[in-house]
Image (cartoon, rainbow, N blue to C red):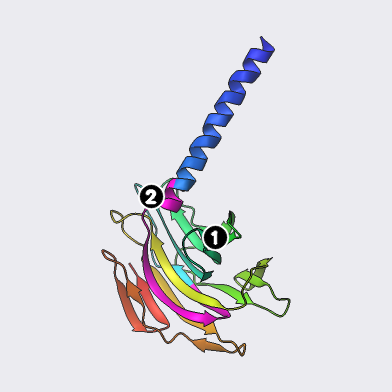
Amino acid sequence: MKNSFLKRMATVLIFMLSACLLMTSAYAAGEHYYVGTKKGSQTGIQAYIKPTEKLSLTESGESAWVSNVSGSGDNKQWVQTGFRYYYNYGDDIRTYVETKIDGVYNMSEIGYQIVGIAVNYKVSYESDKKWHAYIGGTDKGAFSLSFSSATVEAMAESHSSKIDLGPFAFTQVKYKNSSGTWKNMDVKPTADSPFSVDVTNNYTYTAY
């Protein structure tokens, strides 16, 4: 009797885990729409980012982040940090660090983002020859990758064309050049249809 109960519990747990993995894979392989800016061959990216109003979704998810990225297709690698919100998160907007290194994907949710409060998110290659992810000035991880410079991005992202994006406000968007100097972003932000971007200048914009 006891063994039968344990087997049923194990079956339920395996089913739940499989469902979670399928959901994660669906989001990873599904729709992606981007609003923001990027610049090639740099050693860091940072921005102050905030949701300007309460988020509410009936499906799918969205995020706002800074990231490095190198490679393409299955060989793409990155370190990314920001916040994300999914339809089943209630009122919680969760901060995170996401990586894909040598084909291994990892997502770590860290804490919570408050509506209307801009937080500094940063990814930076540093003197220890690792890429670091910062949230609000606090180092949340150091990662070894095969490159010291990469395309750097400051983006809002939606996983569906059927939902409202944000709005997410980006200010003081800066990239770090090969000399280690932080400079205001000088590439104009763009938006994938059906989303939009209000541009004050290349380092200040709102995605929606």
Disc with the residue nearer the chain's start (1 vs 2): 2
Is the residue 207 above or below the residue 163 in the image? below
Callout 1: helix, strand or loop?
strand
Q: Camera-side residue: 188 or 118? A: 188
Q: In the drawing, what numbered circle is on residue 58? A: none
Q: Check if residue 29 falls in the magenta segment.
A: yes
Residue 176 picture location, percent across and down: 56, 84
Q: Check if residue 37 falls in the magenta segment.
A: yes
Residue 194 is left or right of residue 77, and the answer is left
Q: Residue furthest left?
A: 194
The mark tally for this picture is 2
Is the residue 151 above or below the residue 192 in the image? below
The residue to which callout 2 is attached is 60
Q: Residue furthest top?
A: 1
Query: Comparing marks 1 and 2, which lies closer to the viewer?
Result: 2
Q: In the drawing, what numbered circle is on residue 95? A: 1
Q: Looking at the picture, which amino acid does disc 2 mark?
A: Ser
| Image quadrant where residue 62 sits | bottom left
Callout 2: helix, strand or loop?
loop
Residue 170 picture location, percent across and down: 43, 75
Is the residue 189 above or below the residue 167 in the image? below
Please provide the residue range marked out in magenta: 26-48
Task: Give the residue at x 44% y 77%.
Answer: 38
